[in-house]
Image (tube, rainbow, N blue to C red):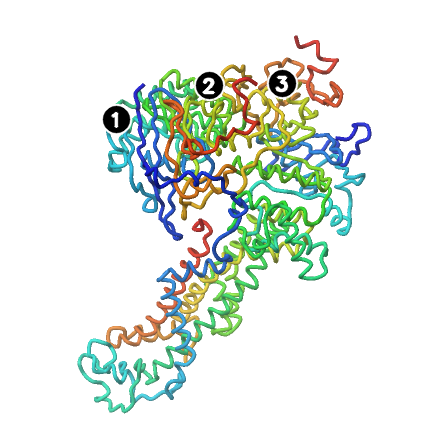
């Protein structure tokens, strides 16, 4: 690469004073770990879509049941087993919302005047309301599972890791015992002691659902305990509280959030599964699992009774999992340059 | 002497979320048969990337050779397919890396790993391969080789592992051995053993070596020729005597004066101020201008051409231009060949 | 350097031991009976290869690890004795530490201001936010950074800059003694010089005492007044820096110095190297008697049966080797 000599004049060989402190200046805006991660998350299209769907489901769960005048237990045998009909969409015949079954317009044959958006079940109850009420229960379980995780799991794992030694030993042996007992056995015990229903499920989750989180928090904190910045803090004279709250917890928060994102779908599924096999929520209270259970018997004839609650619960589980994956990628420090 | 490997105007870039990082910006190198060429530079200089590009080991899809070529045995390695490169790797050009802990497969015996290389490139029986493996372990100074080929990497110490890695690299008698910081992770007494071994092997097998390092002591110990890299470019190249006793580039001066010497007394180390350039936004002219005490206006505008002090000694610096003021190297590094 | 007779010993280490229990009955004898002293205002270099126990010694000195046996006397006070939390805090202010890995020694979730001010917060050295910020800025400027770095996060800085932030953090509590645990090993060569120059400048300005732990012998010689060489949990030799490098007594020190490659091609071409055979034995099961005997070119029978005494072979030059022990020296030619 040769340069034309007449481009470079003699005066260009004058010395320049270079301020080397300029190279100490950091260009660009400062980004904290959270801002950085949020940016990375927003670039993940799958996670963004999942988050939006989840928000929509939460919204519908809250206002859905109030959108029409039917409650979850308004029975009317006259309008039993009507398939779904949404005014406006009923003209589009390849969508399942035209109120017909085997090309027979049920609404006409049964003289039903009002449209049921998700159809009705064998007792004539509005499935739209029941589905969204059921979703409320699933979301409530989600909140309980997250709370148990955060309150019990984090504290248990954190204490076990921080103090180590004998305390850690004992606490971990207890965890192993809990893990050894199958969840189903515990729930059956609960049902014997309490009535089957939401309360027994919540108690079962509270007894065992936090174990996974405690192990993850313990593993992470054990690793962090010997990190040099924690040693530096100890050298400076930091108290236990300070080390835990300013150094160990903030650096574990990423893992905690991700794990919560995965605990929630398994808790939701746990409840739905129990309701499906009849050990969970009892009629007339609707749960997505019990709805699927009732509709399962007539799956071939009235598929919509399973399909709608099935889609909702599938979306819930899939979206939480995708969001959890997206968060894991966003928090992963290895992706950072 | 014939050139066994040539790197011609190599440009390598990485695509990152911050944009294009120009890691190597026009590097020219020649490696002669039987010699040891050291590439010296600090982190971010592009030395490791250059050798990865030679071997076709750049991370895909982020890294790619933008232009230029690598000529070996009359073929341009950058234009070969992965399959063709696989035939060359391990048999004609070998590479050893810095960390002996992670360079070996922990679930395979040492013997199997050596034999794997031999069987991949040569059509020999299992027994022949085994014998060759034992021969190689002896060559690199591992006692009781017949028993040790049955052992696993975790049963070897760091220095021993590095010897095994050298054995694997030399298994098929390659023409070129690329060693990327081979002794950086080792203790100093083990480092002395390994360097001794490498010099010994080089004499025996006449393999050409490209040695990447940041340690000038290792360079003085092992190399015949040296290329100094900074900011993705080679800023000075010459024989080892020329670089240590007659350096001309201010960065080379900076490197030599910032090292404390065991056999001399310094009151304060010369420290090159500032930090290396950000290659996602490389500076227009000479990459070292921002930290150079002798910088001139032209340095910030134009990249200097190479001027030749001798057949072997080339420098890319505007101070070499006849119009530039005459500058003397700092006193501390004028050691002139005696100590 | 003050006259040796007048110099005050700031740190005295007597027969310090630190053992770790590892699985089953095995014990890792990381530090196994180490004695030395550090004078006020000097830099004491501690060198050795991996597994020698130098880092463990540093961390036991300031009670990051509890000592298994032996004593550390800091300014007349026993560091490991029974102490109230107030006394421990006071000790923490006097002894500080700089760490090796610039990428792990700063909390990635904290701003630079919070990192540097941690000591100020713990010991209540500032009355309000403005004073705290002012102190932080002053400290940053002392280490060659500036005000605009205050609200940034660790990952935005280079290795050398991070080490300087670590130094600012240690200085925030106004310590007397700083343990530098391999502070430059992870830095590029040209950046090492920056950090070392900074440390020396700070020492002159503030009268600091340093324990400089490293494996780079050339750098240790440059920065230290006195140097100690460790091998497998024991101290092999201690002497003044110039003296150690020009007149090494212990065979291990001799081999160590011989192994350093010097950036001088002629010197390298002509030198006679002492190449040690074999590898460093495991600290879980060290050799009997003198631990270096398995690799020592001078080893004889007495080395396997008797642990060498720590003796002052020449003035201010201590060594643990039978060659210099009147009782056994006749065994060696």
Question: Disc 3 or disc 1, which is closer to the eye?
Answer: 1
Looking at the rendered structure, the secondary structure element under dot 2 is: loop
Q: Are marks 2 and 1 on the same chain?
A: yes
Instruction: Where is residue C221? Give x, y as percent.
Output: 63, 28
Instruction: Where is residue A62? Give x, y as percent.
Output: 43, 79
Say whether residue A219 is visible. Answer: no
Question: Quadrant of residue C65 in the image?
Answer: top right
Residue extending furthest toward the left: A103
Quarter of the C terminus of chain C within the rendering: top right
**Is A226 situated above or below B333?**
below
Q: CA distance from mark 3 to mark 1?
A: 49 Å
Q: Are marks 3 and 1 on the same chain?
A: no
Mark number displayed over residue C251: 3
Q: Which residue is mark 1?
A: B73
Say whether residue B239 is visible. Answer: yes
Q: Left or right: where does residue B237 sit relative to residue B337?
A: left
Q: Are marks 2 and 3 on the same chain?
A: no
Q: CA distance from mark 2 to mark 1?
A: 36 Å
Give whichever of discs 2 and 1 has the lower sequence position.
Answer: 1
Mark number displayed over residue C294: none
Marks 2/1 in contact by CB < 8 Å: the verdict is no
């Amino acid at each position: 690469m040769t340069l034309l000599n007449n481009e470079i004049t003699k005066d260009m060989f004058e010395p320049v004073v270079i301020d080397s402190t300029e190279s100490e200046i950091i260009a660009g805006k400062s980004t904290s770990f959270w801002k950085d991660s949020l940016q990375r998350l927003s670039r993940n299209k799958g996670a963004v879509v999942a988050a939006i769907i989840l928000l929509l489901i939460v919204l519908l769960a809250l206002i859905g049941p109030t959108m029409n005048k039917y409650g979850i237990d308004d029975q009317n045998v006259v309008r039993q087993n009507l398939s779904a009909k949404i005014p406006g969409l009923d003209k589009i015949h390849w969508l399942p919302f035209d109120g017909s079954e085997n090309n027979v317009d049920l609404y006409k044959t049964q003289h039903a005047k009002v449209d049921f958006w998700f159809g009705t079940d064998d007792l004539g109850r509005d499935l739209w309301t029941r589905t969204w009420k059921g979703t409320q229960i699933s979301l409530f379980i989600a909140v309980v599972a997250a709370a148990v995780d955060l309150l019990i799991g984090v504290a248990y794992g954190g204490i076990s890791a921080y103090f180590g030694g004998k305390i850690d030993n004992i606490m971990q042996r207890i965890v192993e015992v809990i893990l050894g007992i199958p969840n189903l056995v515990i729930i059956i015990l609960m049902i014997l002691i309490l009535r089957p229903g939401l309360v027994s499920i919540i108690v079962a989750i509270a007894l065992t659902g936090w174990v996974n989180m405690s192990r993850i928090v313990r593993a992470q904190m054990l690793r962090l305990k010997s990190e040099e910045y924690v040693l530096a803090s100890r050298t400076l004279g930091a108290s236990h509280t300070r080390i835990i709250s300013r150094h160990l917890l903030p650096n574990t928060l990423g893992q905690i959030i991700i794990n919560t994102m995965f605990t929630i779908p398994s808790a939701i599924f746990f409840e739905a599964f129990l309701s499906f096999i009849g050990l969970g929520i009892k009629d007339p209270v609707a749960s997505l699992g019990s709805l699927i259970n009732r509709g399962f018997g007539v799956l071939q004839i009235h598929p919509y009774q399973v399909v709608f609650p099935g889609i909702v619960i599938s979306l819930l589980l899939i979206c939480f999992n995708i969001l959890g994956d997206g968060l894991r990628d966003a928090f992963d420090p290895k992706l950072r340059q | 002497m014939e050139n066994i490997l040539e790197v011609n105007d190599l440009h390598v870039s990485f695509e990152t979320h911050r944009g294009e990082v120009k890691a190597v910006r026009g590097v020219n190198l020649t490696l002669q048969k039987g010699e040891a060429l050291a590439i010296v530079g600090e982190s971010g200089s592009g030395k490791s990337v250059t050798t990865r590009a030679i071997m076709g080991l750049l991370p895909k899809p982020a890294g790619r050779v933008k232009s230029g070529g690598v000529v070996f045995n009359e073929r341009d390695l950058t234009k070969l397919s992965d399959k063709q490169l696989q035939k060359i790797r391990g048999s004609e050009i070998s590479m050893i890396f810095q960390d002996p802990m992670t360079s070996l497969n922990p679930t395979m015996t040492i013997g199997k790993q050596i034999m794997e290389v031999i069987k991949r490139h040569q059509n020999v029986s299992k027994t022949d391969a085994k014998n060759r493996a034992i021969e190689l372990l002896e060559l690199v100074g591992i006692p009781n080789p017949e028993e040790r080929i049955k052992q696993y990497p975790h049963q070897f110490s760091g220095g021993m592992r590095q010897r095994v890695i050298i054995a694997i690299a030399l298994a098929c008698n390659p023409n070129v051995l690329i060693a990327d910081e081979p002794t950086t992770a080792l203790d100093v007494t083990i480092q002395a053993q390994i360097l001794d071994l490498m010099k010994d092997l080089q004499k025996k097998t006449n393999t050409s070596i490209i040695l990447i390092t940041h340690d000038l002591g290792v360079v003085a110990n092992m190399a015949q020729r040296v290329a100094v890299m900074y900011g993705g470019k080679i800023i000075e190249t010459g024989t080892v005597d020329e670089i240590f006793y007659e350096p001309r580039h201010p960065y080379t001066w900076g490197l030599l004066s910032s090292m404390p010497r065991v056999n001399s007394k310094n009151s304060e180390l010369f420290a090159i101020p500032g930090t290396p350039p950000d290659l996602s936004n490389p500076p227009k002219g000479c990459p070292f201008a921002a930290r150079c005490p002798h910088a001139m206006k032209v340095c910030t505008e134009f990249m200097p051409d190479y001027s030749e002090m001798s057949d072997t000694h080339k420098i890319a610096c505007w101070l070499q231009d006849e119009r530039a003021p005459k500058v003397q190297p700092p006193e501390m590094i004028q050691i002139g060949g005696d100590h | 350097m003050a006259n040796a007779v007048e110099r005050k010993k700031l740190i005295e280490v007597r027969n310090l031991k630190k053992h770790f229990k590892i699985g089953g009955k095995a014990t890792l004898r990381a530090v196994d009976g180490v004695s030395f002293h550090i004078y006020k205002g000097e830099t004491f270099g501690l060198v050795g290869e991996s597994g020698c126990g130098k880092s463990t010694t540093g961390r036991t000195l300031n009670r990051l690890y509890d000592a298994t046996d032996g004593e550390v006397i800091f300014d007349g006070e026993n560091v490991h004795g029974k102490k109230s939390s107030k006394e421990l805090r006071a000790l923490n202010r006097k002894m500080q530490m700089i760490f090796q890995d610039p990428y792990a020694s700063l909390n990635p979730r904290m701003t630079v201001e919070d990192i540097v001010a941690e000591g100020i917060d713990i010991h209540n050295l500032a009355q309000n936010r403005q004073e705290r910020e002012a102190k932080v800025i002053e400290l940053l400027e002392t280490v060659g950074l500036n005000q605009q770095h205050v609200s940034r996060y660790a990952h935005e800085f280079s290795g050398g800059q991070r080490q300087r932030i670590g130094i600012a953090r240690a200085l925030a509590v106004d310590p007397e003694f700083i343990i530098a645990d391999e502070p430059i090993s992870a830095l590029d060569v040209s950046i090492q010089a920056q950090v070392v120059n900074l440390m020396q400048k700070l020492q002159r300005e503030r009268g600091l005492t340093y324990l400089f732990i490293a494996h780079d012998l050339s750098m240790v010689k440059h920065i230290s007044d006195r140097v100690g060489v460790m091998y497998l949990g024991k101290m092999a030799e201690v002497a003044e820096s110039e003296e150690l490098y020009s007149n090494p007594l212990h065979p291990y020190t001799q081999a160590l110095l011989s192994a350093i490659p010097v950036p001088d091609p002629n010197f390298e071409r002509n030198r006679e190297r002492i190449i040690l055979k074999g590898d460093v034995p495991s600290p879980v099961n060290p050799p009997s008697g003198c631990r270096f005997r398995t690799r020592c070119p001078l080893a004889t029978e007495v080395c396997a049966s008797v642990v060498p005494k720590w003796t002052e072979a020449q003035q201010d030059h201590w060594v643990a080797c039978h060659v210099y022990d009147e009782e056994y020296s006749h065994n060696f030619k």
